[in-house]
Image (cartoon, rainbow, N blue to C red):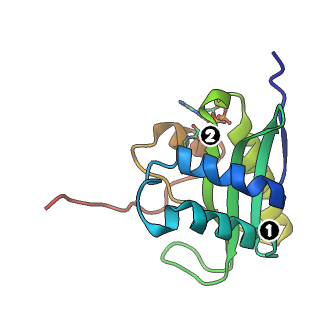
Amino acid sequence: MNNSYTIRKAEESDVKAATALCLEVNPLSQTGEQNSIEFLERFFLGALGSEDAALMVAEARSQIVGFAYAEIEHSSDDCVQGPYASFDLLGVDHRWRGKGIAKALIDTVESWAHEKGMKVIQLAVAESNLSALKLYESLGYRTVMRKMQKEL
Ligand SMILES: CC(C)(COP(=O)(O)OP(=O)(O)OC[C@H]1O[C@@H](n2cnc3c(N)ncnc32)[C@H](O)[C@@H]1OP(=O)(O)O)[C@@H](O)C(=O)NCCC(=O)NCCS
């Protein structure tokens, strides 16, 4: 079986597939306007035309099997002074996991951010998402702040 894939910048014709995959892999996909198909499609289409945003996709056997989205954030937050690269979305089709696709997507996003002159890339990840935590830690990401909750 051919397991090869390519990583590239997304084109308009990739947006529907990237949106569907994003909703499939995102555990919050069933809630909120921000996770509706219409919202995400518009959001990704907007990203294609923006100098400050990057939507990367992984393609294998003519299918979109992974995506990554990042944007330049100009303002500062509690952890980093702006501008910095905000790495906001990542997902790989479950049939294609464990083949280095996420790693390759992140590498491409980091190169894009570096070319944009960014010195820091920042992301948020759920404490329960062990595979993503392992992935990011293996690539040199370190925790700088924790968000805590208590059920009332
Ligand atoms: C997290 C996710 C993107 C990983 O994608 P992937 O293409 O399978 O990851 P890769 O093959 O590039 O893995 C690279 C490294 O990440 C770590 N990793 C990835 N999946 C892992 C798993 N299930 N268990 C443990 N470590 C894992 C490993 O260190 C791995 O390196 P190794 O294969 O040399 O051990 C994928 O599981 C996914 O789409 N999950 C659902 C969406 C999600 O959680 N997105 C991130 C939100 S912050």
Q: Residues within 10 Å of mark 1 (few under 14, many from 20)?
A: some
Q: What residue is at 59 percent from the left and 65 percent from the top?
A: 38
Q: Amino acid at mark 2?
A: Ser
Q: What residue is at 21 percent from the left and 59 percent from the top?
A: 150
- Write down which quadrant ligand 1 falls in: top right
Which of the 4 image quadrants contains residue 111?
bottom right
Residue 23 location (% of width, % of height): 55, 51
Q: How many marks?
A: 2
Q: Which residue is mark 1?
A: 48
Q: What residue is at 51 percent from the left and 59 percent from the top?
A: 124
Which of the 4 image quadrants contains residue 120?
bottom right
Residue 41 location (% of width, % of height): 66, 64
Residue 42 location (% of width, % of height): 66, 70
Q: Nearer the viewer, residue 32 or 120?
A: 32
Q: Amino acid at mark 1?
A: Leu
User: Does label 2 point to a residue whose CB lies under 8 Å from ligand 1?
Assistant: yes
